Amino acid sequence: MVDQEDTIFHKIIKKEIPSKMIYEDEDVYAFKDINPCAPFHCLVIPKNMQGLSSLSKANESHLDILGKLMLAVSKIAAQEKLEKGFRTVINTGEEGGQTVDYIHIHIIAGRNLSWPPG
Ligand code: 5GP
């Protein structure tokens, strides 16, 4: 997978294309997925992707941002009252189903989710 610096999520962070904000702090932005697969479906991304085009690029320098992304998931779950449960997904690479080369965590909720995934 080739690193891209101009993905659709770079454009969303730069507000060059619109998105429906769910949560924002200094380091993290979360917005509604344009093609939701459940009643609640958002994407959580770092404002600065720091070379993390996918989780497979992670190293020790990314510990801080990876922790912040996970903490943001927990805050969003509380904010959105997802007390019945939710699923977090990080699709990685071609066979992992990743289509945007900018690390992102899916939060999916609002219906019974089957396991294993397809
Ligand atoms: P992936 O398949 O890489 O794990 O997830 C990419 C996600 O980005 C998909 O669920 C897709 O619906 C979402 N997506 C793609 N383009 C846009 C866009 O322009 N706006 C928003 N909000 N979501 C997008």
Image (tube, grey):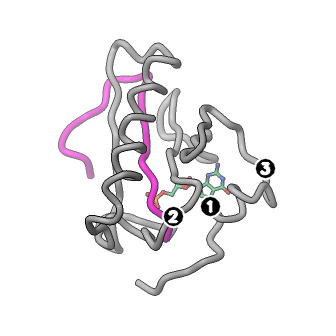
Residue highlighted by disc 3:
18
Q: Which mark is residue 49?
A: 2
Disc nearer the start of the sequence (1/2):
1
Q: Helix, strand or loop at disc 1?
A: helix
The verdict on residue 108 being magenta is: yes
Residue drawn at the location 59% of the way across and 37% of the way down:
25
- The amino acid on which the numbered mark 3 sits, given as a three-letter code, is Pro
Mark 1 residue crowding within 10 angstroms, few (<14) / some (14–19) / many (20+): many
For image coordinates 78% across by 55% down, the residue present is 15
Of the image marks 1 and 3, the number of the one nearer the N terminus: 1
> Of the residues shown, which amino acid type is indicated by label 2?
Met
Q: Is residue 58 left or right of residue 13?
A: left
Crowd around label 3: few <14 · some 14–19 · many ≥20 (10 Å): few
Where 96 falls versus 30 (above or below)? below
- Quarter occupied by the N terminus: bottom left
Q: Are marks 3 and 2 in contact (CB under 8 Å)?
A: no
For marks 1 and 3, give the CA distance: 10 Å
* Discs 1, 3 touching: Cβ within 8 Å: no
Q: Disc 3 and disc 2: Cα gap in Å?
A: 19 Å
Q: Is residue 33 left or right of residue 109?
A: right
What residue is shown at x 33% (from left), y 64% (from top)?
55
Q: Are the residues at dot 1 and dot 2 in contact (C-beta closer than 8 Å)?
A: yes
Q: Is mark 1 within 8 Å of ligand 1?
A: yes
Distance, label 1 to label 2, CA atoms, is 10 Å
**Residue under numbered circle 1:** 9
Type of amino acid at the residue the image marks with label 1: Phe
Chain part drawn in magenta: 101-118
Quadrant hosting ligand 1:
bottom right
Q: Is mark 3 within 8 Å of ligand 1?
A: no
Question: How far across and down, in percent of the image, does residue 65 sit?
Answer: 41, 52
In terms of secondary structure, where does tag 3 sit? loop
